[in-house]
Image (cartoon, rainbow, N blue to C red):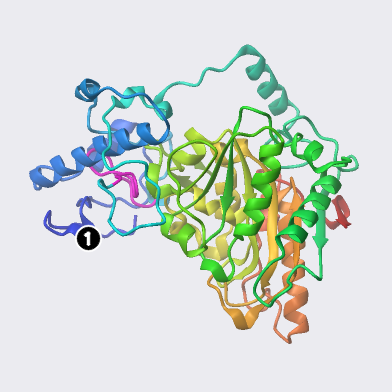
Amino acid sequence: FSGTKHASHPADGARRGTRQVEAFPGLAVEDTRDLERLFRPRTDAFPADAQRSADQSRAASADAAHMLGKPTDDTSAQASSGNSCGLTIPLGWQADKVGVLYKGTRCPPGSAVKWPPRLGCAKKDRGGLSAPKVAEQDLPMNRKPNLSRRDFLGFAGALLMGGGCNGEGRRGDAAGPDAAPEGKSRVVICRDAKLRPTKSGLDSGRLLSILDRAMQAAYDRDSPLEAWKRVVRPGEVVGLKVNCLAGKGNSTTVELVDAICERLQQAGIKDIVVWDRLNADLESARFHIVERGQGIRCFGNDVLGYESELVAFGSAGSLVSRTLTQVCDAVVNLPVLKDHGIAGVTIALKSMFGAIHNPNKYHLNVGDPYVADVSMLPPIRQKVRLHICDATTAQYEGGPSFMPQWTWPYNGLLVSRDPVALDHLGWQIIEKKRGAMGMKPLKELKREPTYIATAADAKHRLGTNDPNRIEVVEV
C-alpha cells in the first residue's frame, strides 16, 4: 500500500470495480478477520456497481467452466455465491508488501470474461457466443485435488531429498535425474549459423533440428522423443509459457513453439496450452488465439483470470494464473534472451512474472529478491519442469521492449532444468556482447541482476550460479 486512496464512480467504465480502501502501511495482519474489517470495500456507496461486479464474477466462473470442458446445468447457477474473489492472507503477512489487496465485490484483474466476444476478431476461436452457467463450487479449479497415496509418497520423498521443481535432480524431471554429472547443473547451448535463410525468417526444419540436438544433450538420450519422455507423461496437460511482451520483434517464436508441440504430441501429449499474460500480447507475437477444444490451445491469463487466494514467499505475495494452477499439469518455460532496463536481464526466472497478477510491484532494487521469491511460489516451483530459452534473436540493450538496433542473431537455444544456471550463462552472453559493442557492464550501470545469486542462496535453492557447478555443453 502506498498510503493513498483509490476510488471511482460506478459510471466510469474504464476503472469499474475499483473501490475506496484505507491504507495501513506496516500493519501485520494476524487474523483474516482483521483484514476483512480493514479492507472492506465501500459497496454501500456503490450498490449498483457492486451488483454489476457480482454478476461479472458469476459470469467469469461460468466462462471458465465452459473453457475447461465442464458439463453445465443452467439451474446450478442458483448455487453460486457471486463472490469468488475473497483473499486468504497468511498469518503474519505484512499488508504493505502485498500491493493492492481487496475482498468482496472486486474481481481480480482479468477474471471477468466479457460475452459476447467483440466482432471482427477473425483470429479468435471462442467456440460460441454465449456462456453456460455452472455452480462455482463445481468448477474444476475449485475442486480439491484427488491425490493418491503413491503421488503423496513420491512428492514427500522429493521434498525430503531437497527437491523442488527446477534444479538438477529435482521434481522437474518427470522420470528422475540423469542428465548431468553429480553435483552439477547442465546448460546446453545449440546454435546453427544457417538458421535464417532470410534476414527475418527462420528455417523451421533447422530449428527443429537444433531443438532435437539440445534435448538429447540435456537428457543424455539417443533420440529426442526419449528425452521428451523424461519431461512429460502421456495424459498430462502441458503448458508452454511463452514471453510475448516485445511483440513479433523479439518474443518466443511461433516456429519454436510449433517444433515443441510436434515433439510433445509424438511423445503422447494430447493437450497443450500455449499461454502468457494477455491475449493481445500473444496475438502481437503472431500466435493464434484458441480458447477451447482439445489439442493445442492458446490464450492469455485474461481468459481464466487468477486464483482468489494469495500465495506468498519472502517479499512476494501474488495471485497466480488459473491457467497454471488449474489447467496445466506441467510447464515448459520458453523465455527469450534479452536485456532489461530495470532488472538487468530477463530470461528464465523473470519470465515467470507472466504467471502472477502484480508483476509491476516487483521491480524495485533490480528485482532482488522479488524475482527469486516469485519463482518460489508453490504453483510455479512445483510445475515448471524445463526451461528452453529462445535465443534465435537476442537483445543486449533497451529491453524488455523490442529495440532492433540492439538485437543480434544469436541463432540458438539454451536448454536446462536449472533456471539459475541458465540465467547466469545467459547474463554472461549478454555482457560479452555489450563489451564487444563498447557498452558498459551492467554492474557499472547499477543493473547487475543480483537476483540470480539470490535464487541460488540457501533460502531459495532454485539452482546454482557457481560456474564450477555448471556444466556447459555446446552442440
Work out which quarter of the rendered image holds the N terminus and state it.
bottom left
Percent position of residue 374, x then y: 55, 48
Question: In the rendered view, does 173 fall on the left or right side of 125?
Answer: right
Please tell me whether residue 104 belongs to the stretch shown in magenta: yes
Magenta segment boundaries in residue numbering: 98-113
Identify residue type, mark 1. Ala
Percent position of residue 190, x then y: 81, 59
Question: In the rendered view, does 76 fall on the left or right side of 220?
Answer: left
Indicate whether 365 appears above or below 305. Answer: below
Q: Which residue is mark 1?
A: 14
Query: In this view of the protein, which residue sits in the foreground, 257 or 7?
Result: 257
Work out which quarter of the rendered image holds the C terminus and state it.
bottom right
Query: In this view of the protein, which residue sits in the foreground, 189 or 158?
Result: 189
Indicate whether 10 appears above or below 219. Answer: below
Question: In the rendered view, does 467 fall on the left or right side of 401?
Answer: right
Q: Is residue 417 visible?
A: yes
For the point 37% across and 37% down, which residue is it? 308
Query: In this view of the protein, which residue sits in the foreground, 42 or 106?
Result: 106
Instruction: Check disc 1: other Cα within 10 Å, few if <14, some if 14-19, many if 20+.
Output: few
For the point 37% across and 27% down, which residue is it? 139
